[in-house]
Amino acid sequence: MANKRDALGKGLGALISGIDSLGVTQTVPAEDTIGNDPVRNPASICEIPVEKISANPYQPRSNFDEDALAELTESIRQLGIIQPITVRKIGLRYQIISGERRFKAASAAGLSTIPAYIKETDNQGMLEMAIVENIQREDLDAIEVALSFQRLIDECNLTQDAMADKVGKKRATVANYLRLLKLPAEIQVCIRDGKISMGHAKAILSLNDPVAQLSLCDDIIKRNLSVRQAEAKAQNMLKRGDRSREAEDKKASSELPDSYYRVLEIVGRYFGNNISIKRSEQGKGSFTIQFSSDAEVESFLRAIENINQ
């Protein structure tokens, strides 16, 4: 029983043995042979010295929760590494593909080696694997996911459809995340910091005006609005905006030049005055005529033809 308890305290390291002359412990044979040719086993795990490992330069994760990292560090001190990280070999060193949080915690816990899968991949393949692995984590915030999606599009030349297939999500889900990046930076920070949820963000996105978006975001936080309350407030803001635009249109139409009133008067005779006009301050606009019969249109046409004769 004492041996089992000791093994638990060493984590994955208790299951392996044999350290080679280069300081890398091979936990499962990294190479088999077919004839005289070595063949790498994709499931091989090696214990790699921590000092030989470098961080991932393509790491999509921008924030590491310090409290959660401290908890993981303590867990590793007690139980060791349960899940190996994934690396690629570059020269005499190794570069992390996924598992940087575990690597940071292992270093803080004072481990000299860490179990790792070794994969062969180029820079783009490494970027794709790192991003996809991070997207699939549950603790990644919505903005980090959105930025990861955008990186796959920009740096890996993936379409939204191809990316959705690669990360195992619906295209509509991908599109919703990408829309978050159109929000003002202040709102993106609130999402990242957990002050508002993805549902709140969708309600905010229903507004097109950045000033209105910031106002709703501020109200959600101050009044602790639920998603449904935020959606209702967004709808009210949209209705108020429509009424405001209608008032502006009426104001503009009430300040028309005299020539416009003459057109309304003359043309309106043939259509029972069912004619309206919209005009911007720049002089652009439209006339709208509503007629009740073909006879009204024919009467108007005869009048125009007589003018031209």
Image (cartoon, rainbow, N blue to C red):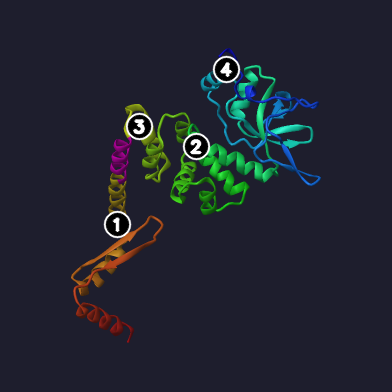
Which span is picked out in magenta?
227-238
Dot 1 surroundings within 10 Å: few (below 14), some, or many (20 or more)?
some
Instruction: State the separation of the CA atoms marked 1 and 2.
Output: 44 Å
Instruction: State the separation of the CA atoms marked 2 and 4.
Output: 44 Å
The amino acid pointed to by label 1 is: Ser
Dot 3 surroundings within 10 Å: few (below 14), some, or many (20 or more)?
many
Question: Which residue has dot 2 on it?
Answer: 143
Q: Could you say whether the residue bearing mark 1 is in a helix, strand or loop?
A: helix
Instruction: State the separation of the CA atoms marked 3 and 4.
Output: 53 Å
Question: Which residue has dot 3 on it?
Answer: 220
Residue at x 57% of width, y 19% of height: 8
Question: Which residue has dot 1 on it?
Answer: 253
- Which is more N-terminal, label 4 or label 3? 4
Residue placed furthest toward the top: 2
Residue 44 pos. (x, y %):
67, 36
Question: Which residue has dot 4 on it?
Answer: 4
Residue at x 47% of width, y 43% of height: 177
